[in-house]
Image: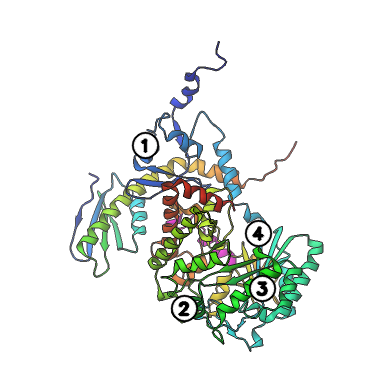
Amino acid sequence: MNAPSAQGAGATMEVKFDKAVFHVDSVKKAAYRFLDRFTPEISLTDEAIGCCLTFPAGTSAAAMAAIIEDFKKEVLDQELRRSIALETEAYRNAILALAFAPLQRTRK
Amino acid sequence: MSRFLPLAYFQKPLEQGYKLLPLRFAPLNADEVVITNQAGEWSVISRRTLNALVRHQLSYDDPEYDALKAKHFLIDNDSDVALDLLALKVRTKLQHLSTFTALHIFVVTLRCEHSCPYCQVSRQSDDRLAYDMSKETAEKALAIVFRSPSPAIKIEFQGGEPLLNFELIRYIVLRAKEINEIEKRDLQFVIATNLAVVTDEMLLFCKEHDILISTSLDGPRDIHNKNRPRPGGDSYERAIAGIKRAREVLGHDRVGALMTTTVRSLSYVNEIIDEYVSLGFEGIFLRPLSPYGFAIKTRSFAAYNRDAWLRFYKDGLAKIIELNKSGIRFVEFYAATILTKMLTPSNPGYVDLMSPAGIGIAAMVYNYDGDVYASDEGRMLAEMGDKKFRLGNLHRDSYEDIVLSDALLNPIEESYTGSVPMCSECAFEPFCGADPVYHYATQGDVVGRKPTSDFCSRNTEIFKHLIELMRGDRQIRAIFQTWATR
């Protein structure tokens, strides 16, 4: 199951991601982008990546729900970024190596 | 008999699939994303296309396929030049690094006869000669200037009000030209002045030595005089008279102007732009206040927030676009700087929007007291008591001590957007910059947490806005193209 579950009340909510589907780096990177909206506490169990999200005092329930929805979408985007980065890493390094290579080659 | 091979011959390699090239994406709206590559080429595609592209499900006869291939987001067996081309484009974007520092700022005095509450350099009252640069210090600064390998050297005189120490400007210009007889650099001079104390004698010297004038103009009389108080309350009248006289002596295009946005400006963007148009300026830089100097002490910086400035900026940009559509060519310079990155192979070398950061690389500041700073903002911070970006002192340190100092190299390395959290995966990174001084000033850290950085959110919003404007209107795209290549 890749559908995260949300539980909790007040300023703290818990969101879980299936470890078989999501990579913890993707969750961490997504959570980082939301540091202006909540403080994350990320933990691992055998099956899940748990995110305990603490919202600033005064955040309404509706606002929290909307932020969590965006967070889940961001985790998916991070998974996509991760697969792009893995596939293209060799090209990225080759492009940088070529870009910084000396212009003139030694003539024989 | 056909002189061409059959279509199937050309399609065969494509049927073998494609490989992804490095790309980054960011949501533009609910359905579309902006994708960019290492060279800053970009495209807007649907999420459906992005998913198909990444999953290798994009068919070669998809309408998007050729465009994505042309911009080097994918590579197939039909072409093997993409990597070399991309590398060449990345190299071109970073070319400015090889020539190193071109802009050298001389703070010839910190004295000023204005008392602007938003002054970001913490000027001193105009009777305190202790805040003037000496000839000895200037001489040592010139020795450093010409150690820069840059073929183009621009010396900018700043203050305070630099014309209050005009004799030193005269000395530096003549000495720089003398040194340049041997150095043969492309040497330029600029004086950043409020023009309140300018005389004909000064202007004739500027004409003789081809010196540009950059002045301050915050808008119409009421806004300008309230923003920029001076004895007599006539800053605007003096600025206008100075602009007129400087143009008469130097030529119309030898005088530029900069405005600063205060809370008072926010409701008057149209009037501010009208002022610039009526004075015949080619454009305006709609510039927010920076978090330095008296702007912090007097709370001018905190008087408005990012959203208020963005509304001001977008309204101003809309008006400027309408002016251009009506046939009046007029540029918004911040947009033009970003558009140069978006629409041309060049990097405009604007310090705030550079990565590696432009500190030291794009500009060096020689303070009146001999201290050397990595940027204008670095010396502004120093006047507030924090010398984090002080690279050394002209009387004690060599060129090597200064450019290889930890105070310069550490923040450049640490803030490089290619490796810091969020920036390294941001689609707008090719258009943006590191700005370690801003992040240090606002967050106490040269990298800064980008989720809470106004620099990040303000620029991201502008990048998206410019892209949306271009996509929605071909005429705007054409106008922006002329700004980017001006």
Whether residues under marks 2 and 1 lie with C-beta atoms below 8 angstroms apart, the answer is no
Q: CA distance from mark 4 to mark 2?
A: 32 Å
Where does the image place residue B273, in percent across and percent down from the top left? 50, 65
Q: Which residue is mark 3?
A: B245
Q: Which residue is mark 4?
A: B100
Mark 3 secondary-structure assignment = helix
Mark 2 secondary-structure assignment = helix
Q: Nearer the viewer, mark 4 or mark 3?
A: 3
Whether residues under marks 3 and 2 lie with C-beta atoms below 8 angstroms apart, the answer is no
- How many residues crowd around disc 1 within 10 Å: few (fewer than 14), some, or many (20 or more)? few
Which residues, given as a range, are shown in magenta? Answer: B407-423
Q: Nearer the viewer, mark 3 or mark 2?
A: 3
- Residue B91 relative to residue B58: left or right: right
Residue B255, picture quadrant: bottom right
Q: CA distance from mark 4 to mark 1?
A: 42 Å
> Within the magenta stretch, is there residue B169?
no
Q: Which chain contains the residue that carries disc 2?
A: B
Mark 1 secondary-structure assignment = helix
Point out the tag, 3 or 2, that comes first from the N-terminus: 3
Q: CA distance from mark 3 to mark 1?
A: 62 Å
Considering only vertical position in the picture, is B122 above or below B209? Answer: below
Residue closest to the eye, B142 or A76: B142
Q: Mark 3 vs mark 2: same chain?
A: yes
Q: Please, what is the three-letter code of the amino acid marked with disc 3?
A: Arg
Q: Mark 4 vs mark 2: same chain?
A: yes
Residue closest to the eye, B481 or B17: B481
Q: Mark 2 vs mark 1: same chain?
A: yes
Q: CA distance from mark 2 to mark 1?
A: 50 Å
